[in-house]
Image (cartoon, rainbow, N blue to C red):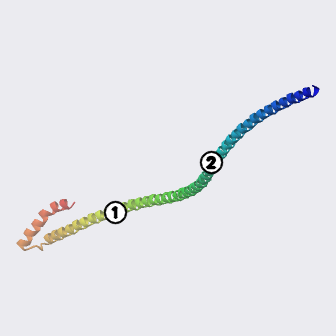
Amino acid sequence: MRLNNGIQIIDVEAMRLNHGIQIINVEAMRLNHGIQIINVEAMRFVHEAMRLNHGIQILTVEVQILVHESLRLVHETQILVHDIQILVHESLRLVYETQILVHDIQILVHESLRLVHETQILVHETLIFVHEALRLVHGIQILTVEVQILVHKIQILKVYIQILKGEVQNPLDQVLIARLLSATPNRILLIR
């Protein structure tokens, strides 16, 4: 009886042990299922991490491209700045040369004005000289007329002397002398 009770107790313990094993198996299955879920989640996480890594690689490439473009733009900007500096230098050189040309033009204008002034002085002196020459010519003309009048008066005096001496005998000479004497006052007036 005691043996039978011991066997029953062993059976109960075996059943309890079997039940515990079943519970352990169920828990193991649940744990295995949890591990599978964790593996799936881990795979999903790895997949997302790979996608994220791929995105990071793409972004890295894009950033490298942007950096390369930025460096290219910086280089081109430096080239443009250098060209602008060259243009500014050329502009300043042209401004300096223009100032020199303006100064030379001012000197030429000043010289031209001086020459114009000297030419005006020469023209004025020439006009004075021409005026003096005209006065001299007019004086010479007056002297010529005076000489002609004097010569004519001398001729008249000669005629008067001939008349007074009685040297005029020819009637034709008397007519010519009369005409000469009558024409003399008008001619003298016309000459004057």
Q: Quadrant of residue 7?
A: top right
Q: Secondary structure at mark 1?
A: helix
* Residue at image location 94% in from the left, 26% down from the top: 2
Question: Where 178 falls versus 56 (above or below)?
Answer: below
Place of residue 138 in the rendered image (x, y in percent of width and height, measured from the top left): 29, 62
Place of residue 134 in the rendered image (x, y in percent of width and height, measured from the top left): 31, 62
Number of numbered discs: 2
Place of residue 33 in the rendered image (x, y in percent of width and height, measured from the top left): 72, 36
Depth check, front residue: 53 or 15: 15
Please identify the residue farthest to the left as the structure is shown: 171
* Residue at image location 72% in from the left, 38% down from the top: 38
Q: Earlier in the sequence, mark 2 or mark 1?
A: 2
Q: For mark 2, what is the residue?
A: 58
Depth check, front residue: 149 or 171: 149
Place of residue 185 in the rendered image (x, y in percent of width and height, measured from the top left): 16, 61
Please state which amino acid type lies under the numbered disc 2. Ile
Q: For mark 1, what is the residue?
A: 130
Please identify the residue farthest to the front as the structure is shown: 1
Horizontally, is 118 left or right of 186 in the view?
Answer: right
Q: Quadrant of residue 55?
A: top right
